[in-house]
């Protein structure tokens, strides 16, 4: 009976700030399709200045697709992603200089040192070397990374590459920071440093999108959680709101309840799809070698 009740629950709506000037990014009825696969379905979100948003979902849920739409790497199939600044709005692709991105694959140039990677990226954003160095030192001290700035990144561990990518994303002082699994490969101490850095950015008025599949980490860092499942936003609210609406005592339980019904519906669709795919494969003619089928 509880599952039937959950089916009728609409996604929680985050309470927007009263001031229109606090809105930084809006995602209006966005869908993204790759061939026959619909990666995102009618996503509507409003992000405000100072938000630290946890984007939570399993593998293939649509988290990375949504992040790439937010930074203009993908264009939506339908809908709009708009960046708000100085009482105006524009497509997010035109506002990339205000974004900082830490992808899951860091994309560092291995022949360059960490500092050279950071400096090159900041020059693309129009930041002087002097300002970049000042900002880099400030962040590197927080991450205990100053002594590694002059080393080529080829020999870095995964955790060191992650730190270099985080500094690179922050060196030009972005207004929105997009993080895709930012603590992957980091030890416990370094992961705490990253979480502390994220919290300080939110307190300073920056907006952070923190994509992760670690529910405990999202609860610890974020003041707002967006649960995405099968390309749909299943819930959007503070951790306490998610617990209240699902009548659970942990975010993990809330996540399971909010995605359980969708998972069962998808399972039914997948069974039908697998059967259809099987018969298409069985009935598709195989390519024969040249001369095959002819009497010799």
Image (spheres, grey):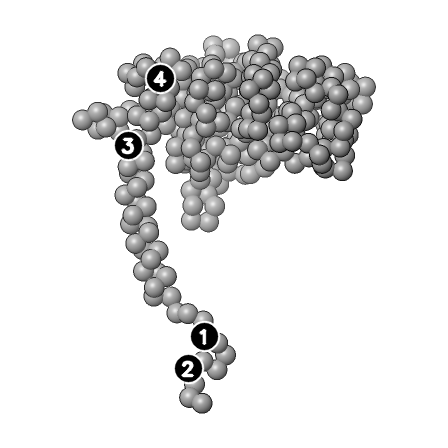
The earlier-in-sequence mark between 2 and 3 is 3
Q: Circle 4 is placed at which residue position?
A: 250
Q: CA distance from mark 2 to mark 1?
A: 8 Å
The first of marks 4 and 2 along the sequence is 4
Task: Compare marks 2 and 1 and give the one earlier in the sequence.
Answer: 1
Measured Cα–Cα span from mark 2 to mark 3: 51 Å
Task: Report the side of 241 relative to 64 (left or right).
Answer: left
Q: Please report contact status of discs 2 and 1: CB closer than 8 Å, yes or no.
A: yes
Q: Compare marks 1 and 3 and give the one earlier in the sequence.
A: 3
Q: Which residue is mark 2?
A: 293
Between the C-alphas of marks 4 and 2, the distance is 64 Å
Asked if residue 113 can be seen in this view, the reply is yes
Front position among marks 2 and 3 = 2
Q: SS at mark 1?
A: loop
Instruction: Report how far apart the C-alphas of labels 4 and 3 lie in the structure.
Output: 18 Å
In this rendering, the answer to whether 171 lies above or below 276 is: above
Quadrant position of the C terminus in the picture: bottom left
């Amino acid at each position: 009976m509880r599952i039937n009740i959950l089916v009728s629950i609409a996604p929680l709506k985050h309470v927007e700030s009263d001031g229109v000037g606090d809105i930084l990014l809006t995602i209006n009825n966005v869908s993204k399709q790759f061939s026959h696969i619909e990666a995102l379905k009618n996503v509507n979100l409003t992000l405000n200045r100072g938000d630290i948003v946890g984007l939570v979902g399993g593998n293939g849920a649509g988290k990375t697709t949504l992040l790439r739409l937010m930074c203009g790497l993908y264009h939506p199939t339908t809908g709009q992603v708009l960046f708000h600044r100085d009482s105006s709005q524009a497509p997010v692709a035109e506002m990339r200089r205000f974004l900082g991105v830490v992808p899951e694959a860091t994309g560092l140039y291995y022949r360059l040192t960490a500092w050279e990677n950071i400096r090159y990226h900041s020059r693309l954003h129009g930041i002087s070397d002097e300002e970049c160095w000042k900002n880099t030192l400030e962040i590197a001290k927080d991450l205990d990374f100053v002594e590694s700035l002059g080393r080529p990144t080829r020999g870095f561990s995964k955790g060191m590459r992650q730190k270099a990518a985080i500094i690179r994303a922050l060196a030009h002082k972005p207004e929105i920071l997009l993080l895709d699994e930012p603590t992957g490969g980091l030890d416990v101490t370094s992961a705490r440093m990253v979480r502390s850095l994220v919290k300080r950015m939110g307190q300073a008025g920056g907006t952070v999108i923190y994509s992760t599949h670690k529910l405990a980490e999202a609860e610890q860092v974020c003041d707002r959680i967006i649960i995405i499942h099968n390309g749909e936003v299943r819930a959007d609210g503070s951790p306490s709101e998610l617990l209240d609406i699902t009548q659970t005592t942990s975010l993990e339980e809330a996540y399971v309840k909010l995605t359980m019904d969708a998972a069962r519906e998808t399972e039914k669709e997948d069974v039908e799809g697998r059967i259809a795919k099987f018969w298409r494969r069985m009935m598709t003619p195989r390519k024969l070698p040249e001369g095959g089928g002819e009497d010799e």
